[in-house]
Amino acid sequence: MKQISRILALLLLIGATTFSACKEPEPESATITITPAELTFDWEAGWQSVTVFSTHDWQLEIEEGAEWITTSQNSHIAGKEVTFRVAVSSDNTSTEERVGRIAFRAEGTTEYLKVTQRGNSNSTPTPTPTIPKENCYSLNGEEHLLPSTAFMMVGENPAIVASPRMGLNSGEQILESSSYFYAAVSPVLNGVEFDLMTESSPYTLISTLSGALLECVAPGLTEEITAGKATFDIVDKRATFVAALTLASGSTLAINISTEAEENITINENTISRGAEKKPLRTAFYMNEEGMTYLYFTPAGIDYAEELEIATWYMYLMVGDQLINNQRFSLTDNIVGGNNFILGLMDNLNADNSWTITGDELGGATGTILLKHNSEGNYTTLLEVVYGGVEYKIAFEGDCISCYDAPVVESNYLLYDGAKHNLTSATIDAKGEPWSLSLRVDNGKSVVITAPESFFDGNAHGFSQSPHLTVTYDGQTFSKANGNSGTLTLNLDQDMLTLDVAFTNYAGCEMAYSGAVTIYE
C-alpha cells in the first residue's frame, strides 16, 4: 500500500497546513504560441505534430462537431514547450472537406488551432443499409433468415450470435457451424448506439456469412468496413443487436438479432470516465477513519488496495462523513473546504496526468458529486467533474473492498476456467518485435504472451495500449482485437536473468510467475 500511504501522507500535510489571507496582484493575461498555426490533412486518417508554449498553465478543448479530431495531450504547465500529436481519427469519405478547431485556454487568453481535412474526390455516396426484420440479415438489400440465435457472456462482455442454419440451440453450436454472425461489446456500450469507425470502447464483430465475411471488426481494426453503426441492448432478459454496415467490398450488410438471455446474467453498469475514455468501473475500495471516508475507484479488475499501484489509473476521494448524505453537492459549495474534501486521479503510466484538488484549492475544477452509504462497505457515488479541461465521471453503486484486506501472495501459478496449474519455466524469443514469452504449465501446455519489448518494464499494461499485446492459452487468445480487457505486468531484470509476470483478465484467467528466464536473441 505504498501508493495509498503516499496519498494519506499528502492528505495529512494538506490538513495540517494553514494559509494566511493576503491580497494577491491581478494575474497577467497569458501568451500562447501554437506552431504551426493551422493543420491540413489529406482525406485519409493521420496525425501531425504541434508545439505549444504558454506563459501560464493551459488546457485544450476540441470544439463541438469536431469529434473526428483527437489529441495526445490535453493540458500542460506554464513555461514549458511541449510537442504532441493532433490526429484525424477517421477517413473523410465525403467529397467535401471538413473543418474543426481546437481551443487553447490559459489565464484570460484563448488561441485556436484550425484543423482541415480534405474531402475524397473519388468517393461516391455511401448507400444506407435498411434494417431487416427481427432475426434476419440483409445483404445488398436481399433479406435472409437467422433462425438460430443465442446470448453469451464472454468474460464480463455481453455477446450475441446467430446463424442461418436451423436447429442450433446454443452459442457454442452456432460458433462451431460454418455460417454465423458474432457480436460482443464492453458493458459500457450496452444500450448505446455507437459508430464502429470511431468507438474506442471494446467491441468485436465477426461474420462468416456468405458474401459478408468479417475476420474481425474492432476499435482500430476497421479495414474491413468503411462505415457502420450498431446498438447492443439488454432489456428484461432479452438481448438485441442491430447494425448497419458498409463493407470495404462495397456491399451493404444490415442485421437484426433478438434472443432471450439467461436469468442469472448480470451486466456491470458501473462506469468510470476521463475525457472520451469510458470504461467499466470494476473495483472500488473504502476506508473509514475518524469521521472521514476514503473511496478509490478503478477500471482495473484487482482484489486488494495494495494492487492499485499496478492499476493503469484510478480516482480517489476523501470526504467528511457529513457529505455522504445522498444529496448532490457542488465543488463550489461552502460545505466543501479544508481537509474535509480531497479528490484526485493517479495515473501509474503517465505521472503528468495525475492531479489532486482540495476544497481550498480547486484549481478551477467545477462539477457535482452525490454520495450515499447504503450498508457496510456498500456505497453509491455519482461524480461529474471538469478539471484541466477534461471531464471525469463516476457512476457506481455496490460493494467496495476494505483497504485493510491483505493480499495473499502467490507465484508460479495459472488459474484458467476454474482450474489451477503450476508454471514451471519461462523463455523469451527476443529475435523480433514484438517479443514472445512462453510460460510452461505443469500439464504439458504453455501460455504464450506477445508484447512489445518496451512492455517488459515493470509497469502495468492493458490490451488497449497495443494490438501486439496478446495472451494465448489452450486455444483461447485474449487481445484488443477480441475485445478483451486485462492487466499485464512484465518485469525483466537488468541482467535479463529473472522475470516477474502478473496477469489478470476479466474472462476468468489470471497468472503469476517469478523466477529464471531463458532469452533467445
Image: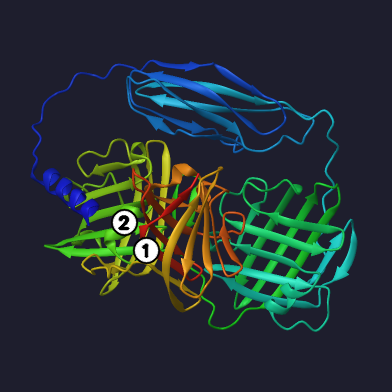
Percent across and percent down for residue 67 are: 59, 38
Q: As displayed, is residue 37 above or below residue 205?
A: above
Q: As displayed, is residue 446 above or below residue 151?
A: above
Work out whether mark 2 precedes mark 1 in sequence or the reverse, and give the earlier one: 1
Percent across and percent down for residue 269 are: 48, 66
Q: Label for residue 308?
A: 2
Residue contact between numbered discs 2 and 1, judged by CB atoms under 8 Å: yes
**Nearer to me, 498 or 172:** 498
Q: Label for residue 488?
A: none
The answer to whether 509 appears left or right of 496 in the picture is: right
Q: As displayed, is residue 204 above or below residue 429?
A: below
Which residue shows up at 73% across the image and 45% down it? 223
SS at badge 2: helix
Instruction: Answer whether residue 393 is visible to the viewer in this image.
Output: yes
Residue holding disc 1:
302
Check the picture and name the quadrant holding the N terminus: bottom left
Three-letter code, disc 1:
Ile
For marks 2 and 1, give the CA distance. Answer: 8 Å
Percent across and percent down for residue 423 are: 42, 68
Density class for disc 1 (Cα within 10 Å; few <14, some 14-19, many ≥20) is some
Which residue shows up at 59% across the image and 69% down it? 158
